[in-house]
Image (spheres, rainbow, N blue to C red):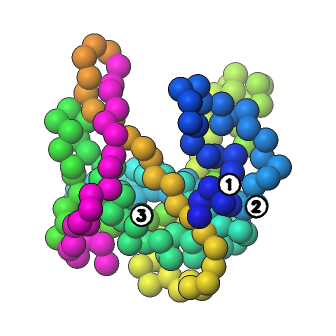
Amino acid sequence: MFFDLMPSEKLPTVSLDLRAYASREEDKGFQAKVFARQEGTVPRWKDVGTVASLNSELLSQAVAKQRPLIARWAYLVCNDFTTGNLLMQVDGPTIELSWATQPPKPGPFDALFGKEIKLELNEVPTGQPFDESMCCGFLGKPGREVKGGGALPRFERIEFPETSPEGSAFE
């Protein structure tokens, strides 16, 4: 459903990724970055993917509707950089979710003086109501960073397991 709303984000079928230059005219929706954290394990918000909805006012509902999928994806994304071990606990506190749209980049003058881009996170409460019939989609980050050889990290591809973990963190 994500690519139906945002065809410009369709993953490449060849080795050259030209999505940055794709026309956004066919996009039917709005997208925002999704962030997750879990008390006691991942205290800072971590980028876990992108959500899309038909209307920018529906982004919180889109995250709420897809909470089970996003929380399980967040569990797979958040890892220890050095060891590669997953950090979130299946039977731990509920995984918290929020979203933020990309703010405009500062102009050259502002960038020269070090003006920072600040994301305004919109937390989505666990009981957030949503319309079951709404059209929305989620695209998770395809890989997680792990310590590689040399100065650069390497990326491990994330694959959704056939049997999803069950626990209090996903409620």
Q: Residue 118: percent from the left, percent from the top?
A: 60, 46
SS label for mark 1: loop
- Quarter in which the N terminus is drawn: bottom right
Examine the image and state in which quarter residue 96 appears: bottom left
Q: Are marks 3 and 2 in contact (CB under 8 Å)?
A: no
Q: Main secondary structure of the magenta part?
A: loop
Q: Are marks 2 and 1 in contact (CB under 8 Å)?
A: yes
Residue shown at 21% from the left, 49% from the top: 86
Mark 3 or mark 2, earlier in chain:
2
Front-most of 152 and 100?
152
What segment carries the magenta color?
152-171
Above-or-below relation of 68 to 15: below
Above-or-below relation of 129 to 55: below
Residue shown at 79% from the left, 41% from the top: 23
Question: Which residue matches tag 2?
Answer: 28
Residue shown at 41% from the left, 79% from the top: 126
Question: Which residue matches tag 1?
Answer: 6
Which amino acid type is shown beneath numbered disc 3? Ile
3 vs 2, front mark: 2
Q: Residue 51: percent from the left, percent from the top?
A: 56, 60
- Marks 1 and 3 sit apart, C-alpha to C-alpha, by 18 Å
Question: Which residue matches tag 3?
Answer: 70
